[in-house]
Image (cartoon, helix red, strand yellow):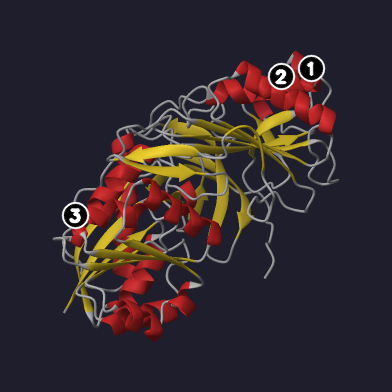
């Protein structure tokens, strides 16, 4: 059923009650209607103007504040509210953790409908700003103007080019970013310098509707080792301007470890089917964790909060309780970071992943780290992880699974149950699908430990680690 618009209704003196899904907050109108409101904090008292009506709720925005929540703080970012990336930057961090913990508990209880142990304290991130190691920005020749900018009559309103983030729910609109608080310098300096140079030299920015323009996207990856990767996506194959820009970037920022580009003229800007070209340096950067080194290339998946990834992996290893004698299956192993991280405490670790490039990275990283007790296999999990696989590698003592947001395929869940592994450590970035899977395993496995981990401060996202033990 399509979206239904409604006449704009104003509800007055509404108290915001809770933090809801996708970073919006929840309130109730005087007659009991549910209201979803962005950019407010539980405890705020506001007037709400609705702009969308559904069968059981309204979506609206706060147009007047009568009083502010004691848990509200002033956002540090000038782009807060328009960007949509840090939807909780106006909320005290301890309250962010409170609501994240509640979300995990409610999902496991309501969706999973399983018996739960007492939760271990949610692990907050030491860094609440400048914690991301990967940022992706879009170029646009029609930048999005905020209401504040339009009303200010700024002199630069005529400047149409933007390099920044998509405006929420608007796939073709880019908000120009001056300073982002998510990635450490020189990230902001690199982005702003590229935009200024491209403007000065008349390079065309991408138009998503007309599919034209030279500059399409910018990706900046950093590592705890200090290494930096910069990748530019060009929509058009313009050798002169491409080399002019890339030479400028490398000259201005000689600390860049890897400077790469891709010419992508297809309908979407995903990199995974593209031929990435190395321009300067090497085609990867190195991440380090407990003396292990992991190469990160342009297509690699790696947890975007390096410091907190280390904490997440330590909890995973602790839950596994390895003694050195166990055979461990690491499902959805990615580039094999968890597999190699736990390998010192295991007899053997078997990693499985669907992305061939990720498995190639995993094997290369194991070689780099002189790890000889890890094996990696590529293929669709539900096809690879079968009876033949178990016969070949033996029954696992521990299964570690870290699936994508959709959770595990039902065939994979059935195979996990069939192995009868004494322990399962389930790492998830989506506690709702995790709860569904836990429910499917509840007859055979009991949840004995739960610990949420905050990987993404200022957002509603939260990871969760669960230990299941054979009944």
Residue 151 lies in quadrant: top right
Check the image and report above or below for 424 versus 104. Answer: below
- Measuring 26% from the left and 55% from the top, which residue is drawn there? 342
Answer whether residue 389 is visible to the viewer in this image.
yes
Q: Which of 151 and 94 is in front in this view?
A: 94
Asked if disc 1 and disc 3 are in contact, CB closer than 8 Å, the reply is: no
Mark 3 lies on residue: 318
Which residue is the site of mark 2? Answer: 196
- Mark with earlier residue (2, 3): 2
Helix, strand or loop for disc 2: helix
Among the two numbered marks 1 and 3 on one chain, the one whose residue lies closer to the N terminus: 1
Q: Are marks 2 and 1 in contact (CB under 8 Å)?
A: yes
x, y percent for residue 26: 44, 51
Tell me the quarter of the picture where residue 241 sits: top right
Q: Nearer the viewer, mark 2 or mark 3?
A: 3
Residue 74 bears which disc, if any? none
Distance from the alpha carbon under mark 1 to that under mark 3: 54 Å
User: Along the line of sight, which residue is nearer the eye, 319 or 278?
Assistant: 278
């Amino acid at each position: 059923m399509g979206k239904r618009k409604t006449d704009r209704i104003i509800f007055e003196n509404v108290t915001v009650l809770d933090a809801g899904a996708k970073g919006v907050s929840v309130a109730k109108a005087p007659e009991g209607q549910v209201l979803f409101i962005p950019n407010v904090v539980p405890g705020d008292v506001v007037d709400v103007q609705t702009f969308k009506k559904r069968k059981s709720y309204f979506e609206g925005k706060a147009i007047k504040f009568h009083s502010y929540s004691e848990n509200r703080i002033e956002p540090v970012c000038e782009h807060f509210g328009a960007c949509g990336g840090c939807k909780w930057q106006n909320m005290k961090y301890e309250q962010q953790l409170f609501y994240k913990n509640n979300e995990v508990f409610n999902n496991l209880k309501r969706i999973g409908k399983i018996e739960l142990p007492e939760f271990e304290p949610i692990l907050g991130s030491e860094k609440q700003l400048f914690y991301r190691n990967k940022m992706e920005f879009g170029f646009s020749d029609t930048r999005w103007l905020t209401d504040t900018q339009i009303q200010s009559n700024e002199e630069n309103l005529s400047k149409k080019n933007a390099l920044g983030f998509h405006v929420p729910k608007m796939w073709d609109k880019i908000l120009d970013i001056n300073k982002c608080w998510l990635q450490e310098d020189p990230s902001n300096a690199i982005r702003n310098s590229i935009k200024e140079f491209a403007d000065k030299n008349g390079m065309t920015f991408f138009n998503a509707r007309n599919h034209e323009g030279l500059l399409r996207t910018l990706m900046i990856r950093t590592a705890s080792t200090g290494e930096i990767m910069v990748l530019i996506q060009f929509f058009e194959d313009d050798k002169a301007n491409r080399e002019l820009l890339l030479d400028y970037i490398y000259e201005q920022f000689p600390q860049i470890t890897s400077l790469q580009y891709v010419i992508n003229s297809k309908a979407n800007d995903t990199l995974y089917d593209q031929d990435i070209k190395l321009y300067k340096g090497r085609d990867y950067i190195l991440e380090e964790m407990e003396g292990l080194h992991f190469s990160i290339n342009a297509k690699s998946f790696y947890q975007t909060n390096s410091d907190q990834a280390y904490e997440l992996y330590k909890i995973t290893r602790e839950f596994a309780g390895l003694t050195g004698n166990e055979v461990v299956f690491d499902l959805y192993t990615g580039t094999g970071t968890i597999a190699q991280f736990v390998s010192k405490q295991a007899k053997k670790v078997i990693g499985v992943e669907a992305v061939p490039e990720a498995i190639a990275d995993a094997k290369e990283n194991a070689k780099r780290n002189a790890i000889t007790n890890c094996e990696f296999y590529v293929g669709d999990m539900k096809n690879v992880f079968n009876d033949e696989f178990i016969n070949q590698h033996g029954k696992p003592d521990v299964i570690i699974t870290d699936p994508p947001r959709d959770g595990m395929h039902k065939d994979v869940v059935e195979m996990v149950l069939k192995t009868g592994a004494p322990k399962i450590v389930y790492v998830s970035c989506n506690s709702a699908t995790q709860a569904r899977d836990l429910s499917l395993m509840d007859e055979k496995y009991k949840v004995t430990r739960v610990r949420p981990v905050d990987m993404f401060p200022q957002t509603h996202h939260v990871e969760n680690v669960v230990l299941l033990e054979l009944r």
